[in-house]
Amino acid sequence: AQSVTQPDIHITVSEGASLELRCNYSYGATPYLFWYVQSPGQGLQLLLKYFSGDTLVQGIKGFEAEFKRSQSSFNLRKPSVHWSDAAEYFCAVGALQTGANNLFFGTGTRLTVIP
Amino acid sequence: DAGITQSPRHKVTETGTPVTLRCHQTENHRYMYWYRQDPGHGLRLIHYSYGVKDTDKGEVSDGYSVSRSKTEDFLLTLESATSSQTSVYFCAISEPITQGNTEAFFGQGTRLTVV
């Protein structure tokens, strides 16, 4: 069965500091992996995705993530955090069923940015 | 947001009453999904649709039914609402993964409170 683990419930970083959010997945086949961001009271916005090919993927807002099959991980990184990055971040794995993009989400990591 | 409208955005209802949430899309995407979001659980798939009148269950489908009579509309019904169904409900849409499209677009969410 597919599952996603985000071990950090809440992370606090200083503005300008680097950021790494951890994500580990369990999936029996080649995974489709995603990072979404959710601001308070809003829907989810896709930051980046891994479908195939280059294991280092670039996303919007200066985020990147690296797929490591040997570690079953897809960690999200940003070299310098901005106050506007404060939000909740969700890692998800896609399970291909009849072409549907059924997503299994982690429980999320809430990011607080301090000045 | 990719042409997805959820209605209502907020609803308070009493235990035992039926409730229907509506998702309307203007993107003509084939797949539509209903997720619920709860603290400590992330988002979990309730039901999804892969075409008009074609639906299937997700991981938390008990107590919910869905219908899709038109490409653009996907309805989620709680036949007899319970307090455990208090949640934020998100609709999502996507194209088939087999066409190389791997992104699901999310609506703004509906906050449902069952008292």
Image: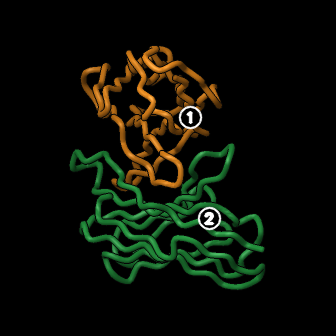
Chain colours: A orange, B green
Q: Residue at x 57, y 30 (%)?
A: A112
- Residue A115 placement (x, y as % from top left): 52, 23
In which image quadrant can residue A94 be found? Answer: top left
Nearest the viewer among A13 and A38 is A13
Q: Is residue A80 above or below residue A33?
A: above
Q: Position of residue A107 (x, y in %)?
A: 61, 39
* Residue at horizontal 58 percent and vertical 78 percent from the top: B77
Amino acid type for the residue under numbered disc 2: Ser
Q: Residue at x 43, y 17 (%)?
A: A16
Q: Are marks 2 and 1 on the same chain?
A: no
Vertical order, A43 against B42 (above or below):
below
Residue type, numbered disc 1: Val
- Name the residue beneath numbered marker 1: A4
Mark 2 neighbour class, 10 Å CA radius: few under 14, some 14 to 19, many 20 or more: some
The C terminus of chain B lies in quadrant: bottom right
Q: Name the foreground residue: A103 vs B40.
A: B40
Query: Residue B37: x, y in percent?
Result: 60, 54
Number of numbered discs present? 2
Give the number of the disc on residue A45: none
Q: CA distance from mark 2 to mark 1?
A: 20 Å
Pointer 1: residues within 10 angstroms few (<14), some, or many (20+)?
many
Is A111 on the left-hand or right-hand side of B24?
A: right
Which element carries disc 1, helix, strand or loop?
A: strand
Q: Which residue is mark 2?
A: B61
Residue displayed at 36% across by 60% down = B93
Q: Secondary structure at mark 2?
A: loop
Location of residue A109 with respect to A44 vertically, above or below: above
Q: Is residue A2 left or right of residue A78?
A: right
